[in-house]
Amino acid sequence: MVVKPNFGKWLSVDTLDSIDKYVLITMQEPWEIIENKISNKPAYLEFNYDMSGDNLEKLYNSFEPFITDSYAIVGLGGGTACDTAKFLAWKFKEEFNFNLELYLIPSIISVDAFLCSSIAVRVDNKVNYIGESNPKDIIIDFDLISEAPKFLNRAGVSDTISITSALGDWLIARDEINERFDQTVFNRAKSIANELINASNEISNVTENGIKALVNGFYEEVLLCEDWGNARPEEGSEHFLAYCLESITHEHYIHGNLIGMNILISLYLQDQYAQFSLDQVTQFFEDIQLNFTAESLKISYNNLKTALKQVKTYVIDEQLFYSIYNSPKLVLNNEKIEEILRFMKFM
Ligand SMILES: [Zn+2]
């Protein structure tokens, strides 16, 4: 069950100073910001940048002899720090039945890892979900987050704004393969995306209200997907093209920027099924200065062409949700792919 975050100025410092004994999983930048502000130093401090299963096991083994059930585990940083902390708390529960208090303090809000209860681990370059975490508290510290580069925080719209294309895919699946559908869930998703679009000014400037809009958007989206039982209202063809492209290039892109580009491709291809207009979403991306072009993402048109050629097979092989890329209405022949590339060069 997703936990509602707490907001405040330097709330990370107050929180750390109020915890008894804790293990801190963090990264260089956020640690440098708060190190001299806290009086209650961590019992163990660990920097981790590697989410491979092997590395996480190694990390767990290094803590295993020292940690008792009186410790708390804190993840302070980006997705990797939060996911590592989630993993350790989960692993101690699995092995010793310890209920270590888990605190998640994102120093940047570029992805929704800090809110998702599922724990993601990379095995052979693929993301595997191994279990659930149950944080005691999620802390949104306005001042800490403001220290991160604005363009990265803005990219945090990705997993909420992906609703704009995921909904068109859902309708296609309803009409073409009779997939389970619920109008109330659909409408709730739509209003989450609209609220985000309405906050474009605040998001652009990464003000406190902008941070709140981004985090609340994440929260509502994660809650909705938990209620519904899967990510259908939020994840569709825009994510699938991203996964396909990443499987070809093995590059890590800024998630929000890549999803931004793919949303526009999806809306273009969905045509009358698109639930948001291309103009409205493009305008939103321009308002929040999201770098969504292939050039700014350093994705060559050749790789993009390969991804578009393979995506239909990819979504079937990976058993992803039915989307525009499964639809018989879309024939991705050379001519169509050239048309998409022309559209992208123009956007
Ligand atoms: Zn995503």
Image (spheres, rainbow, N blue to C red):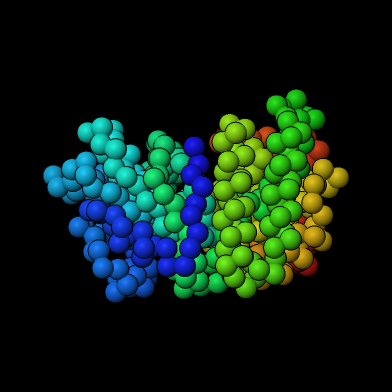
Residue 95 image point, x, y percent: 24, 33
Left or right? Give the position of 135 relative to 339: left
Is residue 112 something one can see in this rendering? yes
Q: Is residue 42 above or below residue 102?
A: below
Quarter of the image that includes the C terminus: bottom right
Foreground pick, 161 / 300? 161
Q: Which of 52 and 115 is in front in this view?
A: 115
Between 133 and 339, the one nearer to me in the picture: 133
The residue shown at (30%, 68%) is: 38
Quarter assignment of residue 341: bottom right
Drawn side of residue 276 relative to residue 161, left or right: right
In this view, 56 is above or below 154: above
Q: Position of residue 327 (x, y in %)?
A: 75, 36
Residue drawn at 80 percent across, 47 percent down: 274
Looking at the image, which residue is at 59% across and 70% down? 207
Indicate the position of residue 200 as horizontal and vertical percent values. Answer: 70, 65
Most distant residue in the left direction:
65
Asked if residue 339 can be seen in this view, the reply is no
Task: State the image coordinates of residue 70 (x, y, percent, origin top left).
Answer: 21, 44
